[in-house]
Image (cartoon, grey):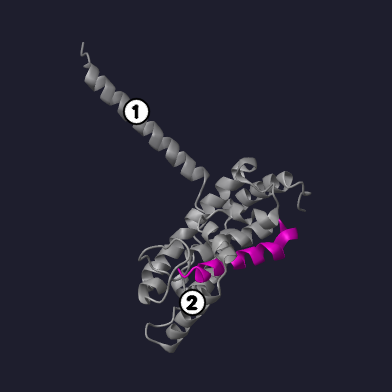
Amino acid sequence: MFSASPRAARTFAAALLLLSALHAAHAADAANPDYLRGTAPDLTVLVAPPPAAGSLAAADDLRQVLALQQSRTPAQLALADGDTHKSVFRFADVVGSDFRAERLPFTEAFFKRLAKEGAGPLKAAKDYWKRPRPYNVSPEVHPGIVTEGTTPGYPSGHATFAYLSAVILATIVPEKRADIFARAEAYAQGRAIGGVHYVSDVEAGKVSGTVIAAAMLANPAFRDDLARATRETREALGLPALR
């Protein structure tokens, strides 16, 4: 009778474990389809292109950044610097102190996932336009917050995140809709105030986030998870269930 060596047995066991892991991953993917499956927007078509380099519009964009650099306050920079960390829980200052990750495990995972999936169309647009950031163009620009190196700046990823999050969060807590969008505006504008984006980058990000949110809302799997996040969040905030 053939007797496998200990090494062969270990190899076979490892292969079985790998196959089991791959099967589990496939099953998880099937149970959790992409939020943008079949609906991913092409931002290079849906968002206006950035001002052309050397154009009057580009010069005006730079003037706005320099003007904001002169007028910005320490409080504005502190808020913008805190917002460099992309987290929906930065909206707690308008949603309520009970809106925090440790109380909302599903909601936290839900918003992380939608942000990750929304980054796909955004990256495609950034790579398509390849617009340099203001501090890479002019030595007069002195960023007041953490920079993003030489990565493309159009549309703004943080502004996209802010508005994607705001659209969905306002669906969960419609009572706070105005406050949520005001906070998203401050989140987005902080990128120009901090000198890491042009104002037009920010405006394009606001459109991008809204477009991505609309595409996700058309996805049945996304709506199912949204309903679950809504129940969890409203219960944590002590709000009645939505009808």
| Contact flag, marks 1 and 2 (Cβ < 8 Å) | no
Q: Residues within 10 Å of mark 2 (few under 14, many from 20)?
A: many
Where, quadrant-wise, is the N terminus in this rendering? top left
Residue 175 pos. (x, y %): 75, 59
Q: Where does label 1 land, which residue?
A: 16
Give residue 71's quadrant in the image: bottom right
Q: Nearer the viewer, residue 218 or 186?
A: 186
What kind of residue is marked 2?
Val
Work out whether 117 lies above or below 65.
Answer: above
Residue bearing the label numbered 2: 65
Residue in the picture at 53% in, 61% down = 161
Name the quadrant containing residue 4: top left
Residue 75 is marked as: none
- Between circles 1 and 2, the one closer to the viewer is 2
| x and y, in percent, of residue 118 in the image | 49, 59
62 above or below 150?
A: below
Query: In this orientation, which residue lies closer to the viewer: 151 or 22?
Result: 151
Kind of residue at disc 1: Leu
For the point 36% across and 76% down, the residue is: 137
The x and y percentages for residue 236 are 71, 44
Q: Main secondary structure of the magenta part?
A: helix
> Under tag 2, what secondary structure?
helix
Please state the horizontal and vertical placement of residue 69, each as a whole percent of the image: 50, 74
Q: How far apart are the two marked residues, 1 and 2, measured between alpha carbons?
A: 58 Å
In the image, is residue 186 part of the stretch drawn in magenta?
Answer: yes
Give the residues in magenta: 172-196
Please give left or right for residue 75 compared with residue 42 in the image.
Answer: right
